[in-house]
Image: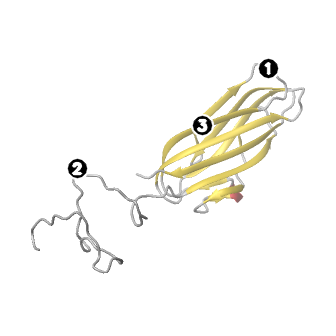
Amino acid sequence: MANGTLKVSNIQTSSGSGTITLGQSGETINIPSGCTITNSGTQTGFGGDNKPYFHVKGNKTLTGDNVSQKLDLDTTVIDSASLLDASNDKLVIATAGKYFISYGIGGTISNFADELQTFRGYLYKNGSSFYQAKHSDSGSNPGEANYVSASFVMDLAANDYLELYALNDVTGSNYCDCYEHLTGFKIIE
């Protein structure tokens, strides 16, 4: 039928199995506004899969007081596209897009008699501070663990890189044991 309207309630192959093709290369199949596509089978070839995705971590002892220091990102928990550059403690983006990013940095004073007054965790993008999370302590709990975290959506281009930094302000000892993680995935647009 050429240039007409086909009205049916069910389309099947004549054999009851096989492939049904709608349209051909270069054509567009239009689904009008208000219509719903219901899928009870397996879909392939459309939609998205939130790749790449990653979860990397590390731990580092901060040895300077009140100085921002780069943290270790040297362990892969999961990394769908091998984005972690462990030798440089950074994550290098391969595919441009909007990403959901989450990071967390914890710090514990090695000498429990000392107090962690201020603890800051930074996400760096391409060598510059992009976001800072801060925790201030009242000084009443020497040696307690402190944790900062943040989550957000950010635009990333291919070859952008992410790093984590921390700053600790300690009365007494100048040592803070840190544990850190960086997690994210590309958003389907």
Measure how far apart labels 2 and 1 are at the Cα level.
Answer: 61 Å
The amino acid at mark 2 is: Ser
Q: Residue at x 41, y 58 (%)?
A: 47
The amino acid at mark 1 is: Gly
Asked whether residue 68 appears in the rendered view, the answer is: no
User: Would you name the residue on which mark 3 appears?
Assistant: 150
Of pointers 1 and 3, the one earlier in the residue sequence = 1
Q: Position of residue 77 (x, y in %)?
A: 68, 55
Indicate left or right for 57 with 65 as reference. left
Colour scheme employed for the rendering of this structure: secondary structure
The amino acid at mark 3 is: Ala
- Residue 54, label in figure: none
Measure how far apart labels 1 and 3 are at the Cα level.
Answer: 23 Å
Of pointers 2 and 3, the one earlier in the residue sequence = 2
> Which circle, 2 or 1, is nearer the viewer?
2
Image quarter in which the N terminus is found:
bottom left
- Residue 33, label in figure: 2
Which structural element holds mark 3?
strand
Q: Nearer the viewer, residue 189 or 129?
A: 189
